[in-house]
Image (spheres, rainbow, N blue to C red):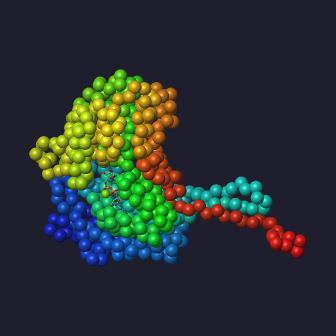
């Protein structure tokens, strides 16, 4: 272990023990209950974390409430918040190797993907440090005589951030940075699959100097998240995860009209036209679905291919997919890691069977790998199904694993119709050399992000979020601040004489 988590972790046998952060204190659960973090590559329970009960959630929310209402945080200046965010970014950069390694132990993602992503999180902090000091209100050109009218943006209050396991730190920072820049306090509930990376990140935030109670972390599974979302003192819930849980959270939030932003699932179309640069496109489509073993909300899981190139493209796609090297995710030469958890692994294998039963044609993959060295890991071969129609379950439901389906289309209109024929609307890709067609497609696709001749790019400057059942609200960029602030409108009279409205001549 490096110096960053010595005070968070203690070792019991070969299992590391971690505490959670409430009001600046590292604590066990009140009833001392714990659960394990399992490494999906070797099946080992490598870490133990507190299982927070409703009492622990109450403590964490109370701490966040005090820090918001009474603490120094509510009086902090934009410069103070920006300075803390910059320090936090520096600490993330300096400890990126350790943060990356822990995420790989938790979810089996490739070190070569996670390492770069983790260093880049520092830039996220630096950007939102700048945002903390950027103007947020507007002066209105009101025609009301003798009135100065302006708006200010104020923090919402206590934010619950409930996060998933696929990119535990990135998807947390998408919430944490704008929430802090705007002056909110937080209670974070990381996924039960990836609790440790969030605890270690919280240690860095504490080192950066955020006051006690501004950032709290409770670890636990669905019930802990549900208790947090239902807490009457939580003013806003920011959630990334499944559409099913996102809908439950929206219902819970509606009871008290808590603010809510949701980043949910997808079944994103990646559309290949015959005029595309084919070698480039094959590589882009492969990265779009198989990066992170397909466990991303924006995975390009429906590959729509023009029928003139359907056979040629499908063959090139399947051949290259069959060469992807599975292995230890900590080995920099490995090209695809494991599925993150046993339940997710079973879900992926189940969907492969559903696809076969529905008549999809298996072009490659479709099973666990046979290599004995991989037998203890939750590996699924990268899988391509061809001759899929958009009404099959494998084309309609999110798998969240390394499974691509290839669907044929005849022309632009049909491509648009199939692409938009989904309950989701997170992302879409278009591969073409025809610039006019690219613009037409961008306009017609119902999705929160559209990539042309690339796929799966995100950046802290660029808003990200979903149409339809892929979510509510936008993360990243200046739009993110809207999700963590209320607008206050201020009217200043600059010289009206106020007559008695009931007796104007008096
Ligand atoms: P999930 O939606 O159950 O979990 C996400 C987070 O919500 C976790 O922190 C979890 O503990 C928490 N949670 C679960 N039930 C809750 C409740 N009733 N109230 C409040 N919080 C609750 O996702 P899970 O079970 O990890 O994965 C299931 C499927 O969800 C995946 O197969 C995938 O399709 C989708 N998913 C989508 C993600 C995305 O990036 N949009 C990320 C993770 C999963
Ligand atoms: Mg779940």
* Image quadrant containing the N terminus: bottom left
Residue positioned 37% across, 49% down in the render: 265
Q: In the figure, is residue 446 to the left or right of 225?
A: right
Indicate the quadrant where residue 36 lies: bottom left
Count of residue discs:
0
- Residue at the outermost top position: 308
Q: Please say if 282 is above or below 55.
A: above
Q: What's the residue at 29%, 59% (across, down)?
A: 194
Say which of 364 and 200 sits in front: 364
Position of the C terminus, as image quadrant, is bottom right
Q: Residue 257 at x, y = what percent?
A: 50, 64
Q: Is residue 187 visible?
A: no
Where, by quadrant of the figure, is residue 90 drawn? bottom left
In the depicted structure, whether residue 423 falls above or below residue 408: below
Specify the farthest residue to the left: 372
Looking at the picture, how far across and down is residue 76, in whole percent? 52, 69
Residue name at image x 52 percent, y 71 percent: 74
- Of residues 402 and 78, the one drawn nearer to the viewer in this rendering: 402
Point out the quarter of the image occupied by ligand 2: bottom left
Residue drawn 41% across the image and 67% down it:
230
Residue 243 placed where, x, y %? 38, 52
**Which residue, as the protein is rendered here, is positioned at the far right?**
505
Q: Is residue 43 above or below residue 501?
A: above
In the image, 478: left or right of 354?
Answer: right
Would you place residue 136 above or below residue 207 in this image? Answer: above
Q: Position of residue 219 (x, y in %)?
A: 31, 66
The answer to whether any part of residue 28 appears in the image is yes
């Amino acid at each position: 272990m490096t110096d960053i988590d010595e005070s968070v972790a203690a070792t019991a046998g070969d299992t590391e023990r971690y505490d959670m952060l409430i009001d600046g204190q590292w604590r066990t659960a009140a009833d001392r209950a714990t659960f394990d973090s399992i490494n999906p590559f070797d099946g080992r329970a490598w870490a133990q974390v507190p299982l927070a009960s409703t009492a622990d959630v109450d403590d964490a929310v109370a701490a966040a409430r005090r820090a918001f209402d009474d603490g120094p945080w509510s009086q902090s200046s934009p410069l103070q918040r920006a300075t803390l965010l910059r320090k936090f970014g520096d600490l993330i950069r300096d400890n990126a190797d350790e943060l990356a390694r822990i995420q790989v132990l938790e979810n089996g993602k490739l070190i070569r993907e996670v390492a770069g992503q983790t260093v880049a999180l520092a830039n996220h902090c630096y950007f939102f440090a700048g945002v903390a000091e950027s103007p947020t209100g507007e002066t209105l050109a009101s025609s009301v005589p003798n009135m100065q009218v302006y708006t200010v943006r104020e923090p919402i209050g206590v934010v619950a951030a409930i996060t998933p396991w696929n990119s535990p730190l990135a998807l947390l920072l998408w919430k944490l940075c704008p929430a802090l820049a705007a002056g909110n306090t937080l209670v974070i509930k990381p996924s039960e699959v990836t609790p440790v990376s969030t605890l270690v990140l919280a240690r860095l935030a504490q080192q950066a100097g955020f006051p006690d109670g501004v950032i709290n972390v409770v670890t636990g599974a669905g019930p802990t998240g549900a208790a947090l979302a239902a807490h009457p003192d939580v003013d806003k819930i920011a959630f990334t995860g499944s559409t099913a849980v996102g809908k439950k959270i929206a219902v819970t939030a509606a009871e008290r009209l808590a603010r809510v932003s949701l980043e949910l699932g997808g079944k994103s179309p990646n559309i290949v036209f015959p005029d595309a640069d084919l070698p480039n496109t094959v590589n882009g489509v492969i990265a779009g679905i198989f990066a992170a073993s397909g466990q991303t909300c924006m995975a390009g899981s429906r590959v729509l291919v023009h029928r003139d190139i359907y056979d040629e493209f499908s063959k090139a796609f399947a051949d290259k997919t069959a060469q992807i090297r599975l292995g230890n995710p900590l080995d920099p030469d490995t090209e695809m890691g494991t599925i993150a958890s046993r339940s997710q692994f079973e879900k992926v294998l189940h969907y492969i069977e559903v696809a076969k039963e529905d008549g999809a044609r298996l072009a490659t993959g479709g099973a666990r790998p046979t290599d004995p060295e991989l037998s203890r890991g939750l590996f699924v071969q990268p899988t391509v199904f061809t001759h899929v129609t958009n009404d099959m379950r494998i084309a309609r439901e999110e798998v969240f694993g390394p499974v691509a389906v290839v669907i044929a289309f005849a022309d632009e209109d049909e491509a648009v119709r199939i692409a938009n024929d989904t309950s989701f609307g997170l992302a879409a890709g278009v591969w073409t050399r025809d610039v006019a067609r690219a613009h037409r497609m961008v306009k017609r696709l119902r999705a929160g992000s559209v990539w042309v001749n690339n796929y799966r790019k995100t950046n802290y400057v660029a808003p990200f979020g979903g149409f339809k059942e892929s979510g509510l609200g936008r993360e990243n960029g200046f739009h993110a601040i809207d999700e963590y602030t209320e607008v206050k409108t201020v009217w200043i009279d600059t010289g009206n004489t106020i007559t008695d409205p009931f007796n104007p001549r008096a």
